[in-house]
Image (tube, helix red, strand yellow):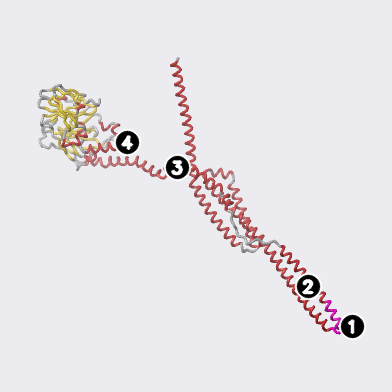
């Protein structure tokens, strides 16, 4: 029962965790989708909104300059000119309001779509700014016309007042003349004129008195009219000071508020969004990254094509490499191996028995010395050959076991580190030599004091060496028996008229072999990187070549090394290791 409950709760816990994971994935997916939509929207809108804001600011400055110029021109205009300009401004306001109505049409908005939002905001802001400027200009023109009307009324009243003043002065002068004439008439009267009221002088005085009285009445009436007009002029409203058009910037900012608000929200998102900031960092190098990626994909194929169709055919037509026996008496081909393995080309086995006779000495890597008799003396050889210390170290031919015996003994050699490796015994007769890559050497048996000599052969002047990156070849001179290792088996075959083998599998060849490289076929596997460009070709009478059945260089782990390891391996291969 307890086991059943524990299984049930374990199942419940697993599915609960799975459910929580699904929920988290969906939530994260929704968040990422929303962020990506906002990033796409801002990426599309922000540059356009900034451009629209710049265009709007420039258009506003231009319109303000035009309105200010018109205002300066209208400040000295006549009443008729002001009326004409006001009619023009009213017509302009009507046209802008009609365009705004068309811009707000729902069908037009649906046809335009969301992609034209910055352009529509820019157009709406420009229309609002122009409309606001025209309205402010219209209000200013109305104020200016009212002032001009007041000024015209005051000017007419003042002219009338001046006329009344002049009329009063004229009547006053006439009155003064009449008074002077009356005073002169009073002075001419005598006692007779006082006694006789109907005398001529007396009648003249009465006429002058009547004239003075009438003239005084007219003068007083003129003065009364002047004073009434003066009082009226003084009661007229004061005209405002000469006005200049002062544009209200706040109302203009309010007219362009939708565009500015949209831009502010986009810039706020750009400043706070990690996704947008990441996009801003990635976007400048995105084109270069795509170019590098395309080059990374295309360039290797182009290089492979050049190597396949140009360099490989040139190498195939070049002279083969022949490593001649340095003594010049290589008259014994390699038939000695048949005494060990019969007529089969495979000369390797999981283990081999090797007879160590009196006077023989054997150098072998400790991992390949499986068993030996108890009476054999075992020492240590620090380095296989001090003259070739780098190949010896690179091929793990250091800290070797040195074996020698006073009587015949059998040594069993076998790989104890790799289950796929087999060992082969390659007997090199005296006076012969065999080219061998040091990586395939596990040990060597020779007469004591007659350690096989290693010779270095550089081939820098041939295209085969440069294409295979093997510039130096190491040959081992007999008499000696080489212990060669290879994965799943080592084969020694007769070259004859010509044999091909994978370059990665080649371990060595006899010095009289005509060695060259040929283009691998077919083309497609090479282009896809599934096989090497070149195969090794061996030819020659009584010529032999040695190779392993499963190349270590062709394994997936070997091909997936880091670039530094590949570079080191290429350098070692160039040195014959």
What's the magenta region? 189-210
Looking at the picture, how far across and down is residue 89, in whole percent?
Answer: 62, 56
Task: Examine the rendering and report whether any part of residue 346 can be seen.
Answer: no
The mark found on residue 277 in the picture is 3
Q: Nearer the viewer, mark 1 or mark 3?
A: 1
Q: Quadrant of residue 374?
A: top left
Looking at the picture, how far across and down is residue 164, in whole percent?
Answer: 74, 70
537 w.r.t. 185: above or below = above
Q: Main secondary structure of the magenta part?
A: helix
Q: Nearer the viewer, mark 4 or mark 3?
A: 3
Identify the residue shown where x is 61% and y is 50%: 98
Q: Earlier in the sequence, mark 2 or mark 4?
A: 2
Residue 397 included in the magenta stretch of the image: no
The mark found on residue 29 in the picture is none
Separation of residues labelled 2 and 1 (CA atoms): 33 Å
Which residue is labeled 4 in the image?
Answer: 528
Q: Residues within 10 Å of mark 4 (few under 14, many from 20)?
A: few
Q: Earlier in the sequence, mark 4 or mark 1?
A: 1
Separation of residues labelled 2 and 3 (CA atoms): 94 Å
Q: Quadrant of residue 287?
A: top left
Which residue is labeled 2 in the image?
Answer: 219
Position of the N terminus, as image quadrant, is top left
Q: Secondary structure at mark 2?
A: helix
């Amino acid at each position: 029962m307890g086991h059943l409950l524990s299984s049930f709760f374990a199942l419940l816990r697993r599915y609960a965790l799975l459910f929580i994971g699904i929920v988290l994935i969906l939530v994260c997916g929704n968040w990422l989708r929303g962020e990506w939509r906002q990033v796409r929207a801002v990426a599309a809108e922000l540059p356009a909104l900034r451009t629209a804001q710049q265009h709007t600011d420039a258009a506003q400055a231009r319109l303000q300059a035009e309105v200010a110029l018109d205002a300066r021109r209208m400040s000295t205009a006549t009443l008729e000119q002001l009326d004409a300009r006001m009619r023009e401004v009213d017509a302009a306001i009507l046209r802008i309001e009609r365009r705004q109505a068309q811009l707000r049409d729902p069908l037009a908005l649906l046809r335009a779509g969301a992609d034209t939002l910055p352009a529509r905001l820019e157009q709406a802001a420009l229309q609002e700014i122009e409309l606001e400027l025209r309205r402010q200009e219209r209000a200013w023109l109305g104020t200016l016309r009212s002032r001009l009307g007041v000024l015209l009324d005051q000017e007419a009243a003042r002219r009338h007042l001046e006329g009344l003043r002049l009329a009063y002065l004229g009547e006053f002068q006439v009155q003064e003349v009449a008074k002077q004439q009356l005073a002169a008439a009073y002075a001419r009267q005598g006692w007779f004129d006082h006694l006789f009221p109907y005398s001529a002088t007396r009648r003249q005085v009465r006429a002058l008195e009547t004239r003075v009285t009438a003239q005084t009445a007219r003068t007083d009436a003129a003065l009364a009219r002047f004073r009434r007009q003066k009082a009226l002029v003084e009661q007229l409203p004061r005209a405002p000071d000469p006005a200049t058009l002062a544009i209200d910037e706040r109302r203009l900012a309010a007219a362009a508020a939708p565009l500015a608000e949209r831009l502010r929200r986009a810039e706020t998102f750009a400043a706070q969004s990690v996704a947008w900031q990441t996009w801003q960092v990635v976007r400048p190098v995105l084109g270069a990254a795509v170019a590098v990626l395309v080059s990374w994909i295309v360039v290797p194929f182009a290089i492979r094509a050049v190597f396949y169709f140009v360099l490989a055919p040139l190498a195939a037509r070049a002279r083969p490499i022949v490593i001649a026996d340095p003594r010049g008496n290589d008259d014994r081909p390699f038939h000695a191996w048949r005494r060990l393995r019969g007529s089969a080309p495979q000369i390797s086995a999981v283990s081999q028995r090797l007879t160590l006779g009196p006077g023989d000495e054997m150098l072998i890597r400790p991992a390949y010395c499986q068993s030996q008799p108890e009476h054999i003396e075992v020492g240590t050889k620090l380095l296989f050959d001090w003259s070739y210390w780098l190949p010896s170290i690179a091929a793990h031919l250091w800290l070797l076991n040195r074996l020698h015996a006073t009587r015949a003994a059998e040594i069993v050699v076998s790989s104890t580190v790799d289950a796929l490796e087999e060992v082969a015994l390659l007997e090199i007769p005296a006076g012969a030599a065999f080219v061998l890559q040091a990586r395939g050497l596990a040990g060597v048996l020779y007469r004591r004091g007659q350690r096989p000599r290693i010779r270095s052969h550089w081939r820098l002047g041939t295209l085969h060496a440069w294409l295979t990156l093997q510039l130096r070849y190491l040959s081992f001179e007999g008499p000696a028996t080489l212990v060669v290792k290879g994965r799943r088996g080592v084969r020694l075959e007769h070259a004859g008229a010509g044999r091909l083998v994978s370059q990665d599998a080649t371990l060595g060849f006899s010095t009289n072999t005509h060695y060259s490289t040929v283009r691998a076929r077919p083309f497609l596997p090479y282009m896809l990187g599934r096989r090497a460009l070149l195969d090794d070709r061996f030819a020659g009478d009584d010529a032999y070549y040695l190779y392993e059945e499963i190349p270590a260089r062709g394994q997936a782990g070997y091909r997936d090394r880091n670039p530094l390891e590949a570079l080191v391996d290429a350098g070692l291969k160039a040195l014959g290791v």
